[in-house]
Amino acid sequence: METKDVSQTEHSETTERDPLFEEVAITVVSSGNATADRIAFDYCIGSNRASRIVEQLEVAGIVGPYQGGKPRKVLVDLPTLKAKLNKNKNTRPVQTNPFNPDYFSYTDDYPIEEVWNTDNVLAQLIVPRLLAFKELDKHGCPEDFKDMRAWNNAIQEMVDAFELMKYVQSLSDEESAIVEKGLNLFCKYFRYLWD
């Protein structure tokens, strides 16, 4: 009777990461939601595969251990995750010919994972700054608004749009309308967002 070395099997399963591992890791850290159900839903994959990815995230030190029915605790922030993902990873050289079909312009400072999620990265940067700007309440208001309250409501609509961009992978029609309105306000009044 042949026996199987279980420790070798378990080790190889944890070292071979799912092809979606990095993308899921970025989403989990960005959203703070580390549940297999959410991953399965967001990526249209089976619950077993999603559970394996969550286990891989735990082994990598990105999320904490299983806590019953609660979401797992996210243990790292986005810069730490970026460092973990780039560790021991070969980066492609920067191409300089934009006519080359393989052209890409990111460097080690902007890995492809971050470029793929530029909307999410920008939303993470913009939301806290918009909220701080709004809370200062020492800024002027564009002529289009009758008072500061109306202007602050417009700033909140911008925040709401970027918040949806941070956490939601696929938007409903209502959410899409919120994002579109908030981004249009942001584009139109960008120059008023500093004093």
Image (tube, grey):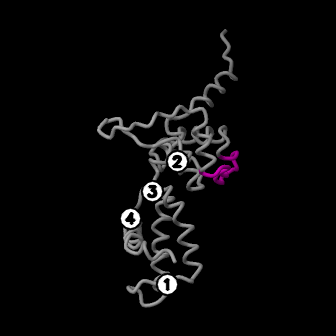
Q: Is residue 174 left or right of residue 109?
A: left
Bounds of the magenta segment? 63-78
Q: Nearer the viewer, residue 21 or 158?
A: 158
Residue marked by disc 1: 140
Dominant secondary-structure state across the stretch colored magenta: loop
Looking at the picture, which amino acid does disc 4 mark? Ser
Residue 39's disc is 2
Q: Nearer the viewer, mark 1 or mark 4?
A: 1
Measured as percent of width and height from the top left, residue 55 is found at 63, 39
Residue marked by disc 4: 176
Residue shown at the point (59%, 50%) measured from the top left: 35
Asked whether disc 2 touches disc 4, contact meaning CB atoms under 8 Å apart, the reply is no
Residue shown at the point (48%, 74%) measured from the top left: 193
Separation of residues labelled 2 and 4 (CA atoms): 21 Å
Residue marked by disc 3: 119
Q: Earlier in the sequence, mark 1 or mark 4?
A: 1
Q: Earlier in the sequence, mark 4 or mark 3?
A: 3
Q: Is residue 96 left or right of residue 140?
A: left
Measured as percent of width and height from the top left, residue 13 is found at 61, 28
Looking at the picture, which amino acid does disc 3 mark? Asp
Q: Earlier in the sequence, mark 1 or mark 3?
A: 3
> SS of the residue at dot 1?
loop
Q: Nearer the viewer, mark 4 or mark 3?
A: 3
Residue extending farthest top: 1
Looking at the picture, which amino acid does disc 2 mark? Ile
Q: Is residue 73 left or right of residue 31?
A: right
Separation of residues labelled 1 and 4 (CA atoms): 29 Å
Separation of residues labelled 4 and 3 (CA atoms): 14 Å
Q: Is residue 85 above or below residue 192?
A: above
